[in-house]
Structures are given as C-alpha cells and as structure tokens.
Amino acid sequence: MPETLQTAPRLSARTRWRDTIRSTPPGLVIAVLAIAAVVLVAVFLTIDLKGNIAYILPRRAIKVSAMLLVAVAVGVSTLLFQTVTANRILTPSIMGFDSLYILVQTALAFVAGAATLATAPSTLKFGLEILLMVGFSAFLYRWMFTGATRSLHLLLLVGIVLGTLFRGFSSLLQRLMEPSEFIVLQDLFFASFNNVDPGLLGVSAVLITLVCVGVWRMRHTLDVLALGREVAINVGVDHKRVVMRVLLACSLLVAISTALVGPVTFFGLLVVSLGYQLCRGFRHAWLLPIVVLIGAIALVGGQLLLERVFGFATALSVIIEFTGGILFLYLLLKGSLK
Amino acid sequence: MTTTAVRPTAAASRNRTGETARLVAAAAVVVVIAVGSIFVGVSDVSLPALVANDAGAWEIFWVSRVPRTVAVVLAGMAVAVAGLIMQLMARNRFVEPSTVGTVESATLGILVVTVLAPDSPILTKMLVASVFAVLGTALFLAILRRLPARNTLLIPLVGIMLGGIIAAVTTFFAYRFDLLQTLSNWMIGDFSGVLRGRYELLWIVAVLVLVGLFAADRFTVAGMGQDFTTNLGLNYARTMRLGLMIVSLISAVVVTTVGAVPFLGLVVPNIVSLLFGDNLRRAVPWTALFGAAFVLLCDIIGRTIRFPYEVPVGMVMSVLGAILFLFLLLRKRNA
C-alpha cells in the first residue's frame, strides 16, 4: 500500500516534466541542446590535454569530426526514412541498409580484387559503391513498400532477415577470397572512431553538407509526406519522385556513415525517438536540428563517459546496440499492445 | 459405429506401413550422403586406399572423418527437432532457438564460465550454458504470455530482438575480457575442429531427440494454452518445462561442441510441414532426417567451395537459411 501512495505523485511529476518540455519553444530546446553539444565537444578536445599537444589535438579533432558527421548522417537518414515510411520503428539500419553497403563493398572487392580496390582512387570507389547501393536499395525497398500487403511486422521481419542475409553473404564472400586479399578488405571495414581515415573525412563532409542542403530545402514537403501517402498525393506532392529522392539521400548518408565507422544498428532509432520526445509537433524544420544535436550529444558524451569515467576504449557501439535493442522491443510491444 | 471405427484404423495401419517404408528410404538417402561426406576432405581418404588397408587413411578415417560425419548428423537432427518443439510450444512457425534468444543465452553462459572458471571441464561449461539457455528461453516464453494477441510476425520479431540484446551483453563482456575471437567460434557453427574425443558429448542430444519424439504430441497440446491442456488432463507446467529443457539442452550442447547453426531449426520444420502437412507424429522423424541431410549438404558445400580451405557450416547455413526464411515469409504475401 505505501508503494502505491508513493508512485502516484511521482507519476504526475513525470507527466508535468514532460508537459514542461512539450511546452518549451522548439527554438529554446535547440539552443540548449546546441550549447550542450558545443560544451561536450570542447571538453572532449581539451580534457587531460598534456604532453605533445600538437600530436594529440589533431587526432582528437579527427575523432570528434567523425562523430559529428556520423551523428548528422545517421540522425537525418533515420528521420527521413521514418517520414517516408510513415512509422516510428523502421530505420535504414534495421531494414538492412548498412549491411547492404558492406555487401556491395565486398562484392566489388570480390570481382575486382581487394588489392585493386585498396589502391583505386577513393572518390571513384566511393562513387561506384554509392551508385550500386542506391540502385539496388531503390529497387528492393520500392518493391517492398509498394507491395499489396504493407504489414509493418512483415516489413520489419523481412528487413531484419535481409540484413542477416547480406551480412552472411558478405562474410561468405570474404571467406572465398584469397586469404591475403581478405586481410586487405578487413582493414577497409573494421573502422571505428579510433582509426578514421582523414582522407575520407573531407569527402564525407562535403557530401553530407550537399545532402543536408537538399533535405533542408525539402523540409516542408517532408512535413506533408509524414501525413501519409494518400494525404501527400491529395495535397499535390509528386509522391513517387519525392520518395525516390529521399531514399537516395538515405542511401548516401548510410553509405557515408558506414564507410566512416561501420554499422550502428540502433543508433538512429534511439536518436529519433528521443527527438520526437523533445519536440512538440512534427515540423522537420525543428526535428532535423534536434535529432542531429541529440546524436552529437549521445556520441560525444557517450564516448567521453566511456573513455574517461569507465576507462573503456571502443565499446560504445555495443552499448548503443544494447539500449537501442531494449527501446526497439519497448516500441514494438507498446505499438502492438495499443 | 463399428465400421466407422474400424475403417480409419485399417487406413491408418496401411498408411503406417507406407510411411515406414518411405522413412526407411529417406534414412537410406541420408546414410548415402553421410558416407559420401566421409570421403570429402584435404587428406586422401579414398575407397581404394581403405581397401588397400593404408594405415594413414584408416587413421584419418577413424580419428577425423567418421567423428565429423556423426557430429554433423547428430547436430543436424537435434537442432531441427529443437526448432520443431519450439514452434509447437510458441504455436508459431517462425521461431526457433536461434530466433528467440536460446542460442544467444547459451553463448553468454559459456562466456561467463570461461571468464570465471577458464579451466573447468567441457561438461561444466555445457551445464552452465544450459542453465543460461533455460533462463533465456523462459524469459522469451514469459514475454510471449504477456502479448495480448498472437500476432504471427510479432513473436519472432520480439524473439530476435531479445536475442540481439543478450548478444550485445555477451559482446560487451567478450570485448572487456579480450575474448571476441573465442566468441566467434561459438557464434558460427563449424565442424572442422571435430575429432575423436572432442564431440562425444553430442550423443546427449540423440537421447534428447528421442525424448522429443515421444513427447511431441504433448507440446502441441501445451501450445494450445493452459486451460486447454489441463482440460485434456495434461500437466501444463510440467509439459512446458520438459519442452524448455529439451530445447535449451540441445542448443547448449550444440553451441558448446560445434557452435551455433542458424536458421536450421526454423527452415527444416517448415519444409517438412509444407511437404507432409501438420501431422506431428510423422513430422518429428522427417524433421530429424531432413535436418541431418541439410547440415550434411551444407557441410559438404563448405568443404568444397573453397578447396583446400574450409568455410564454416554456420556461414553457408546463414546464407541458405536466410534465403529460405525470406521465401517462407513472402510466400504468404502473394497468396
């Protein structure tokens, strides 16, 4: 009995807290998040800064820029994907996008030889990979999303199994290569925040900026798209073309983030769910920056916490997987209990 | 009344003779594949060499080839039957020990025992893995009971996620204790390490398959729910416990000796049900035979596709199994 007496006021306090957040103007939310992100980045760059500063600082800068780029790429692509598919659970990673990217890369290496691939100009290689991936994913996901039955559960299950299939197929192809080639290829994949290729950072930053400018200009169309296919068509949106364009943007962003740090399955889901919690209304003009900032705070802050407080090195993706998995399960069960 | 009672019995007995003949024929086919697989490998173990009584060939035959084939057959049968029992208990065609967290829990168990008591014998590791597998599967079944509607596709989704969460915990600690490489040995089934003296515990699963064969009908009844089961005079809790134990033990034993064999328990029972319908007494032996044949074929593919190197059977299985699973999922969509 005393327990129920205690929980009642706590519950109302929580709703009151949520109401406070919901009634905060989105501009203020963005400002607070931005300040937090800037502070975290500054702390990350300067904490325990001693010894050879000229050596340490650029390395930290590379690491932190990779995180920021990934935060933008994953946050924006997940938000776009959820808008286009009009749901809150599907994300590009859960649907197998990033394992598809790894498969495309492996298949290229298998056909052309890993050594050729490693010495080929990185922009040419990247362009070819993106082209293949966009083509294939556009084919695959248009086919899936325009099918007769559009059960969310079926889509999810097919996506998860496709992801497993792509991963399995990649590792099979990798095993079939010459062992020496396999080693070269392995180096291309297992990047983490600790050994990001600085050469790729510049190209990625330019590409991400271009995509983001395009997305930003589409923000009002995206608001309409979020209302569902029928409404969007009624209002006069060229649904098919816009969806294609958004999927293209998603493929680009996923490819970039996967190339930079490897797959992070549930990060997008975590960030976008939090974004919807913090943002009143569903305007992309607000959602986009909020989601990106939350991503930056989560990555930089999480890494900082792991490295400095717990003394771990690179297990951040595992923690993301763990919490993201629980959130996913929660959303899944909540959605089906309704 | 007597005529109606007699006729089905006669038909049934006639059916049973035909059924037995077909089962024996299928078993013969499996034996042929198994014998064939004995002669696949890097070192020369050919029939002429054996006939000529080549000592080296005979040694490889007894130390490596025969144990390997026996291990493949045992694991294939057991994992497929475990999948079938899991499907009956969850009353869902899309679940199996590796999609509900059982295999992941067993792996976590091995990791825990490897970290805490690295020198413990393999039987201890198996026991700990089994305890973890039971707990993980029980957790899944508990979540399942709380789902209001038995949504066909939601159940495997929840199971896969549960497995993913447990796997994340395992990876986290494997990373901390520098055991990631060891971990991948358990996660990808591989028979290349099977030698005489290293696989014999797999015979345990043969016993478990037999128990499953005799108790199969009970799992169907238990899958119908507690009230239904009790009405038929069956102890619901005890039946569920038995199923849980069989599935978890099989998974734990297979994971500790050869590693996880994904999708097998899912695909084989589905194919059997497509071919033979849902008669359970018939399904168990057929599932066991198909399971053995499927793993034998995958193992032969793995051994020959990149000769003289080997591709682990788990990898071949994850590609073939995933394709078959997709086929099963999308089959209904077009219907």
Image (tube, coloured by chain):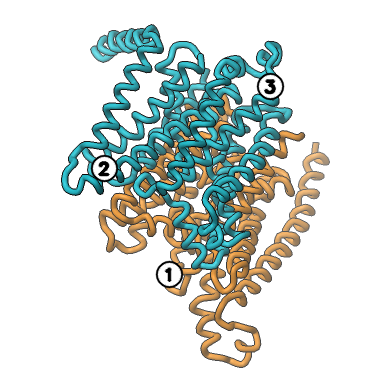
- Dot 3 or dot 2: first in sequence order is 2
| Residue at 66% in and 41% down | A135
Give amino acid for label 1: Arg
Chain painted in cyan in the figure: A
Residue B56, relative to residue B291: is it above or below?
below
Say which quadrant the C terminus of chain B sits in.
top right
Chain containing the residue with disc 2: A
Quadrant assignment, res B308: bottom right
Q: Secondary structure at mark 2?
A: helix
Q: Residues within 10 Å of mark 2 (few under 14, many from 20)?
A: some
Give amino acid for label 2: Leu
Colour in which the image shows chain B: orange
* Marks 3/2: CA–CA distance: 47 Å
- Most extreme residue toward the bottom, as rendered? B52
Q: Secondary structure at mark 3?
A: helix
Quadrant assignment, res A112: bottom right
Chain containing the residue with disc 1: B
Give amino acid for label 3: His
Q: Is A140 situated left or right of A284 in this image?
A: right
Q: Which residue is mark 2?
A: A57
Chain containing the residue with disc 3: A
Q: Which numbered circle lies on residue B198?
A: 1
